[in-house]
Amino acid sequence: MATRATSSATTSKAAAATTKTSAAKAATTKKASKATDDEVVVDEAVKKPATKTAAKAPAKAAAPKKAATKPAAKAKAPAKAAAKDEDEAEGDKVDIDAPEVDDDEDSDKEDTSKDEKLPTGAIVLSMADEDDEVPVYSAAITGATADPVKDYLKQIGKVALLNAAEEVELAMRIEAGLFAEDKLASEGDKLSPTHKRELQWVARDGQRAKSHLLGANLRLVVSLAKRYTGRGMQFLDLIQEGNLGLIRAVEKFDYTKGFKFSTYATWWIRQAITRAMADQARTIRIPVHMVEVINKLARVQRQMLQDLGREPTPEELSRELDMTPEKVVEVQKYGREPISLHTPLGEDGDSEFGDLIEDTEAVVPADAVGFTMLQKQLESLLDSLSEREAGVIRMRFGLGDGMPKTLDQIGDTFGVTRERIRQIESKTMAKLRHPSRSQSLRDYLE
């Protein structure tokens, strides 16, 4: 009886499990068929001839198709799960209706926000460490580098170069703008409102043309400024000075001559750079005409050094430059560059250049000691004289303040004549020449 009861219980459990599996298969098949029918209905609706509204908005017609494909995809997942459960052991339960989480849209949004590129020149704020109590924020500009020259070249490289016809067109617009500005400045109050607006528009158009012509030739300034590097001015300073010359060239350019603008502007750019170097590159300013002579001398000296294989003499340079040898030496002195006394010397830099230069005005320690002893000896000798005699000697030879006084000045001080002061001086000097007093001073005269 117990064996039969056990067998019946086992049979009941197997039947219950079989019933659940069959119910799961039926539910899965029903959902899959329903999803397939929905997909077919949607596809047929999309394939039907489009109405006027659908024809005008194809994006709206495509939206239901995308929405219909998602339920079909979700329906396939439970069907695969049910098929997999058939191979598992009997008695296991299958959760067919478990919801499926779809994070594709969220992940796509996050990836899109991360991959989105910021525009050049945007300021980005970032926090160094979020765990700190007082976080440190830093700012950075997108598209910028640590090299200002590279940034400048990148910026001016965006403007396309001009051909001859475009240069003439811009020059004509600039000329018309300048004429309009002069007209407005001279007759602005007498013009009608309509005429005044037209002239203002022409003037603004001339300014735009001027900016365009300047921007298209900034690379010309850079190419010319490279030739003057290493002569006392920074590269960016040379570029800025050359840009001033370019502005002057734009204002003076005459398109009717038939020359290219770059040919004309080169001379203005060079002049602006050389004038700036003459005024700013040297610690001691040298006149422009002398700078030209120094540069000419340097060129001739380099050429003769290459031809002769040695340094040329002032006489050889004078024959080439058509000047005297003395003038050549003088120009060479003008061309010397001053250096700082604090320039470090050696690999360690422990000593400076000023340490090697002798101070001609410095007092030698031995002489300073001897002078101090001499002063003390003179004071002891003067103390042996009377007050009037010592005062006359001090004032006559400037022993007190270093300023010797005349007989009249000393006489006015003591209230006597200059002759009396001369007598006192003569008598006192005779006392000091006595061997008893002068012997102690003879050692300082040897």
Image (cartoon, rainbow, N blue to C red):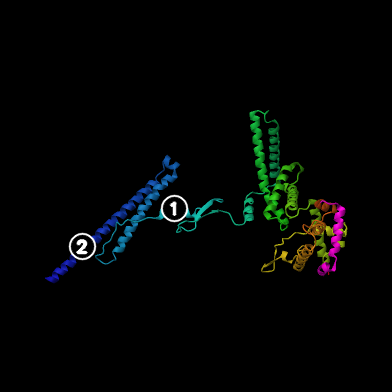
Q: Amino acid at mark 1?
A: Lys
Quarter location, residue 27: bottom left
230 to 59, vertically: above or below: below
Pointer 1 and pointer 2: residues touching (CB < 8 Å)?
A: no
Residue 400 coordinates in the image, percent (x, y): 77, 58
Closest to the observer, 66 or 141: 141
Which part of the image, by quadrant, shows the C terminus? bottom right
Residue 69 in view: yes
Is 442 inside the magenta-drawn segment?
yes
The residue indicated by pointer 2 is 16
Residue 401 coordinates in the image, percent (x, y): 77, 57
Query: Which segment is the magenta one?
Result: 415-444
Closest to the observer, 83 or 393: 393
Q: Earlier in the sequence, mark 1 or mark 2?
A: 2
The residue indicated by pointer 1 is 109
Q: Amino acid at mark 2?
A: Ala
